[in-house]
Image (cartoon, helix red, strand yellow):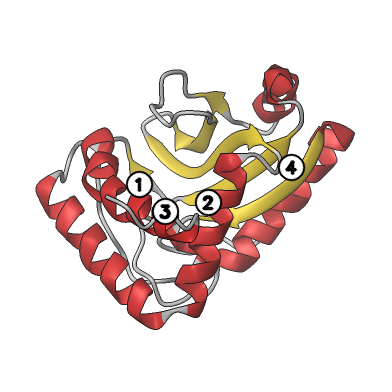
Amino acid sequence: MLKPANLGLKANLNLLVAYDPLWPAAFEDEKARLAEAFGPVVKGIEHYGSTAVPGLCAKPILDILVGISPLFEWERCKPALEVLGYDYAEGAGVPGHYMFGRGRDRRERTHLVHVVEYQGESWRDSLAFRDALRCEPRLRESYAQEKTRAAAAAPRDRAAYNLQKGPFIAEFIRKLSGDHTA
């Protein structure tokens, strides 16, 4: 299993690092572990978030989107994730996501699994944003600036960091959906 040297971040710290070209391979290794553990309950496993976008600065934590259907069966994923060293991050504050983290310990995360409704709104929007960042250099640069601003404004508060950059992402999703009001 490949282990990028800069993978892992202490709880609540918002530190951005340069893109590591080993992140996709680290994701593929973890995806194989997850797929084997989950079996048929999971409909899709995707690398998303900034570590999935070549050239984009990121918090050094692999975000993994796990799609299940129906979402109310998310607890069926819990035992498999616990066996792999993940713990449930109750109240992580991402609507429609059931989040699990793993790392060196509970104070430092290397991986976050977001269990969402397969092909639901969170699944579609998250992957659309990732794909746009991969394809559109201007969007990627603007988002990098937004992330840098958010990290400076909230260096030790993960929820505040996410709130800071949330409007940028929401605006992209609004435009994507064709809603040109606001």
**In front: mark 3 or mark 4?**
3
Residue at image mark 3: 179
Q: Earlier in the sequence, mark 2 or mark 3?
A: 2
Closest to the observer, 175 or 70: 175
Q: Amino acid at mark 1?
A: Leu
**The furthest residue to the front:** 181
Q: Earlier in the sequence, mark 4 or mark 1?
A: 1
Q: Residue at x 70, y 44 (%)?
A: 119
Describe residue 10's horizontal placement relative to residue 89 as left or right: left
Looking at the image, residue 179 lies above or below residue 143: above
Compare residues 126 and 115 and report the one nearer the observer. 126
Which three-letter amino acid code belongs to the residue tagged 4? Leu
Disc assigned to residue 9: 1
Residue at point 27%, 50% (across, down)? 182
Q: Which residue is the extreme one toward the bottom? A: 137
Closer to the N terminus: mark 1 or mark 2?
Answer: 1
Determine crowd level at label 2: few under 14, some 14-19, many 20+ residues with C-alpha closer than 10 A.
some
Mark 3 or 4, nearer chain start:
4
Q: Position of residue 65 (x, y in %)?
A: 61, 45
**Answer yes or no: do the residues labelled 2 and 4 have beta carbons within 8 Å?**
no
Q: Is residue 159 left or right of residue 58?
A: left
Q: Is residue 22 above or below residue 160?
A: below
Mark 2 vs mark 4, CA separation in Å: 19 Å
> Closest to the observer: 156 or 181?
181
Q: Which residue is mark 4?
A: 34
